[in-house]
Amino acid sequence: MSRAAKVVAALSVDEMTERQGRAEHKRLSEEIAHHDKLYHEQDSPEISDADYDKLRQRLKAIEARFPQLVDMFSPSQRVAPTPTTAFAKVRHARPMLSLDNAFSEEDLQAFFDRLRRALERETDLKPMPRSRWPASPRSTACP
């Protein structure tokens, strides 16, 4: 990455000029395309899902600030590449729930709510009183 690109990458989106936003948008688009190919086609990711999500969040923030940068080639407007045929299709006995992009306590609580509702539907359990829910997702230990 060039020195100028490093400077722009270090800026918050709110501090960027349109020219800087355009350069950062191009850089992020190329980096996301690179990681999409590694992940979906080669099953060989170089970065964590969290780091990938940060790239996409920054791209979306730039597009929100500079909507004129959104075009049909932007990663925000495309579906990921077709996965390699090496991946076998799997039919799960139960629906697989996802955290999506949980980056805050509220996101995590929304996931817990979806999980609880799914479990209640599946087992016909009576809803657990909210007073018995964990006070905070941070206070619950994950297995």
Image (cartoon, helix red, strand yellow):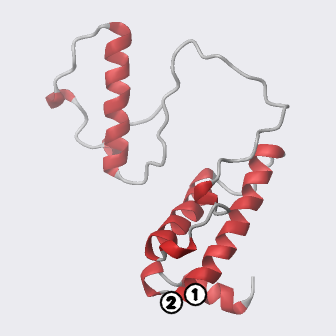
Q: Which residue is mark 1?
A: 20
The percent position of residue 33, horizontal first and vertical second, equals: 73, 60
Tag 1: amino acid: Gln
Locate residue 25 relative to residue 142 in the image: left or right.
right
Front residue (pair 57, 69): 69
Instruction: Give the answer, above or below, for where 26 lies relative to 126.
Output: below
Instruction: Give the answer, above or below, for where 125 lies relative to 67.
Output: above
The percent position of residue 97, horizontal first and vertical second, equals: 48, 29
Tag 2: amino acid: Thr
Residue at 53%, 25% in the rendered image: 96
Locate residue 101 relative to residue 140 in the image: left or right.
right
Quarter-of-image position of residue 21: bottom right
The percent position of residue 40, horizontal first and vertical second, equals: 76, 44
Badge 1: few (under 14), some or many (20 or more) residues near its Cα, within 10 Å?
A: some
Front residue (pair 71, 5): 71
Residue at 44%, 75% in the rendered image: 65
Quarter-of-image position of residue 114: top left
Per the model, the C-alpha gap separating discs 2 and 1 is 5 Å
Q: Are marks 2 and 1 in contact (CB under 8 Å)?
A: yes
Locate residue 112 relative to residue 29 in the image: left or right.
left
Q: Disc number at residue 17?
A: 2
